[in-house]
Image (spheres, rainbow, N blue to C red):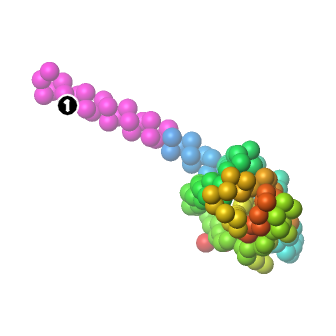
C-alpha cells in the first residue's frame, strides 16, 4: 500500500471517528439541554413560591431525569443484592460518581452534594431516618456501616429505603450506621 493510500485511509478513519463523536456530542447536548430546562423550571418554581426545601423534596420525587434514573438503578441494584457493607459503599460511591459526572455537564446549574449525619440503627429493626442538613434533599444512600464481625456470614443489610423523609436500613443481627447522600441546586 503506497503512502497516498495510507494517508487517505487515515483521513477516512479520522473523519468517521469525528462524525461519530459529533453525533454522540449532539445527543448528549440535547439531553443536557432538556435536563437543564427541566431543572431550571423546578428551581424557579421553588424560588417563586417561597417554599422551603421540603417542598422541593416532594417535587423532586416526580423528576424523570437521567440523573434520578441512574440513582434509582444503583439503589435498586443495592436493594436486590445482599452483600457486605463494602459492597453497599462501593455501589453508593459509584452512584455518587455517576451523579457527579452527570451534574457536571449541566451548563446553567450546579448540584452541591454532601453526606448527611449518621444515625444508629438497632439490630434486625428499621433504623431511624438518616436526614440531610437544612437546604438539602435526599437523593441516595451514602453509606451503611455494619457494627458486627466483618467475617460473620450473617452480618448483612436486608433492605434499605430512601424517600423524602431520609434513608433507613434494616441490618440483620448487628447494629449499623446509616448515612444519606444529600444534594441541593446552586445557581452559578
Is residue 60 placed above or below 76 in the rendered structure?
A: below
Give the secondary structure at mark 1: helix
Please tell me which residue lies in front, 30 or 87. Answer: 87
Quadrant of the image containing the N terminus: top left
Magenta span includes 12: yes
Q: Residue furthest left?
A: 2
Where is residue 172 shown, x and y percent of the image?
79, 57
Q: Which residues are magenta?
A: 1-23
Tell me the crowding category of disc 1: few under 14, some 14 to 19, or many 20 or more residues within 10 angstroms, Cα based: few
Q: Residue furthest top?
A: 1
Left or right: where 130 falls relative to 90: right
Magenta span includes 165: no
Is residue 140 placed above or below 131 in the rendered structure?
A: above
Please tell me which residue lies in front, 120 or 186. Answer: 120
Is residue 54 placed above or below 66 in the rendered structure?
A: below
Where is residue 142 shown, x and y percent of the image?
68, 64
Please tell me which residue is depicted at 62% across the width and 54% down the height of the picture.
87
Is there any visible trace of residue 125 in the rendered image? yes
Please tell me which residue is depicted at 39% across the width and 39% down the height of the picture.
18
Q: Which residue is mark 1?
A: 7
Where is residue 36 shown, x and y percent of the image?
66, 57
Please tell me which residue is depicted at 73% across the width and 76% down the height of the picture.
117
Is there any visible trace of residue 36 in the rendered image? no
Please tell me which residue is depicted at 35% across the width and 34% down the height of the picture.
15
Amino acid at each position: 500500500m503506497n503512502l497516498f493510500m495510507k494517508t487517505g485511509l487515515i483521513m477516512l478513519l479520522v473523519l468517521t471517528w469525528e462524525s461519530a463523536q459529533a453525533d454522540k456530542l449532539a445527543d448528549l447536548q440535547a439531553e443536557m439541554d432538556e435536563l437543564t430546562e427541566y431543572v431550571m423550571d423546578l428551581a424557579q418554581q421553588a424560588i417563586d413560591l417561597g417554599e422551603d426545601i421540603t417542598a422541593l423534596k416532594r417535587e423532586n420525587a416526580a423528576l424523570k431525569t437521567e440523573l434520578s434514573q441512574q440513582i434509582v438503578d444503583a439503589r435498586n441494584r443495592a436493594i436486590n443484592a445482599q452483600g457486605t457493607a463494602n459492597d453497599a459503599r462501593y455501589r453508593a460511591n459509584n452512584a455518587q460518581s455517576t451523579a457527579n459526572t452527570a451534574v457536571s455537564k449541566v451548563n446553567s446549574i450546579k448540584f452541591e452534594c454532601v453526606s448527611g449525619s449518621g444515625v444508629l440503627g438497632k439490630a434486625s429493626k428499621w433504623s431511624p431516618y438518616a436526614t440531610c442538613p437544612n437546604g438539602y434533599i435526599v437523593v441516595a444512600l451514602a453509606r451503611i456501616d455494619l457494627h458486627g464481625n466483618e467475617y460473620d456470614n450473617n452480618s448483612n443489610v436486608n433492605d434499605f429505603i430512601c424517600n423524602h423523609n431520609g434513608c433507613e436500613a434494616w441490618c440483620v443481627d448487628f447494629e449499623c450506621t446509616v448515612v444519606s447522600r444529600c444534594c441541593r441546586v446552586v445557581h452559578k
